[in-house]
Image (cartoon, rainbow, N blue to C red):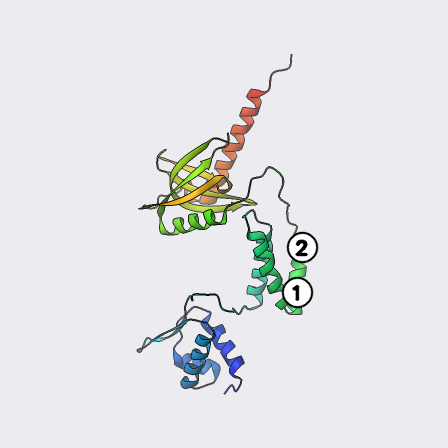
Amino acid sequence: MSRDPTGRALRLLSLLQTHRLWRAAELAERLGVTERTVRRDVERLRHLGYRVDATTGTAGGYRLAAGTHLPPLLFDDEEAIAVVVGLRAAAGAAITGIEDSSLSALAKVEQALPDRLRRRVSALDDSVVSLQRTPGTGGSVDPEALSSLASACCSREEVRFDYRRRDESDSRRLVEPHQLLSAGHLWYLIGWDVRRDAWRTFRLDRIRDVRFAGRHFTPRTIPGGDAAAYLTSSVASIAEERDEEVQTTISPRR
């Protein structure tokens, strides 16, 4: 039987973070304690701010649920490295305001890393080359717009927004948002333009004032069935159009 309440509570938290339903008997066996002790440890976690839901009956048990605030989390080695890599990538992203938040979170995580993980992260740094953002590749993305569009994609709800075209003119759009994609420092939205009755690809750094339209839609099949392939073909088509525009505006040499 484990006599270290703190260590046992951390072990219990680690098990609950797998997001499966645990029966009290299973947890007691894993922790080497009685079911009564499991109940006390669950209450201890609740007092620390973790929301642990309990269900009764033969199919009942304990499950870690989302809370009203973010309590401390436990990561295994691979998860910790993934968090560090993700935060470093986010620190160089083109989302307004996220760079400082990412660097702040990164500093906290790296400070807590044990030496063995620091060495693995350093090895990644030595092996990976990051391409710097080049001038003219696009502006920054409004994080609120990104969040709203992501929510609309999940809930299948139409959105309205103002969009700046390539020629710098503005237009108002009513769109069924289907998929968000990132390509380097650029973010894109693939959606069905309701008024134009056609698929469109929108750059998020050109989107402003996202509003929910209050109507849900039935998902359509993205051309080719693959969002990434459709984005690639759309961007390639735009590049070809630009080349043609440049060629037609160059006066022939006399």
Helix, strand or loop for disc 1: helix
Q: Is residue 40 found left or right of 107 in the rendered image?
A: left
Q: Gap between marks 2 and 1, in whole Å?
A: 14 Å
Image disc number at residue 132:
none
What residue did someone put label 1 on? Answer: 118
What residue did someone put label 2 on? Answer: 127
**Where residue 205 sits: x, y (%)?**
51, 41
Say which of marks 2 and 1 sits in front: 1
Q: Residues within 10 Å of mark 1 (few under 14, many from 20)?
A: some
Report which quarter residue 41 is drawn in.
Answer: bottom left
Residue at the image position 65 percent from the left and 53 percent from the top: 128
**Where residue 233 sits: x, y (%)?**
49, 37
> How many numbered badges does the structure rendering display?
2
**Where residue 212 sits: x, y (%)?**
37, 46
In the rendered structure, which amino acid carries the disc numbered 1? Arg
**Sequence-first disc among 2 and 1:** 1
Residue at the image position 48 percent from the left and 46 percent from the top: 181
**Where residue 141 sits: x, y (%)?**
52, 45
When the figure is inspected, residue 241 is found, relative to residue 39, above or below; the finding is above
Helix, strand or loop for disc 2: helix
Residue at the image position 48 percent from the left and 77 percent from the top: 12
Q: Is residue 212 found left or right of 10 in the rendered image?
A: left
Residue at the image position 46 percent from the left and 79 percent from the top: 44
Viewer-side residue, 90 vs 179? 90
In the rendered structure, which amino acid carries the disc numbered 2? Ser
Viewer-side residue, 200 vs 223? 200
Q: Residues within 10 Å of mark 2 (few under 14, many from 20)?
A: few
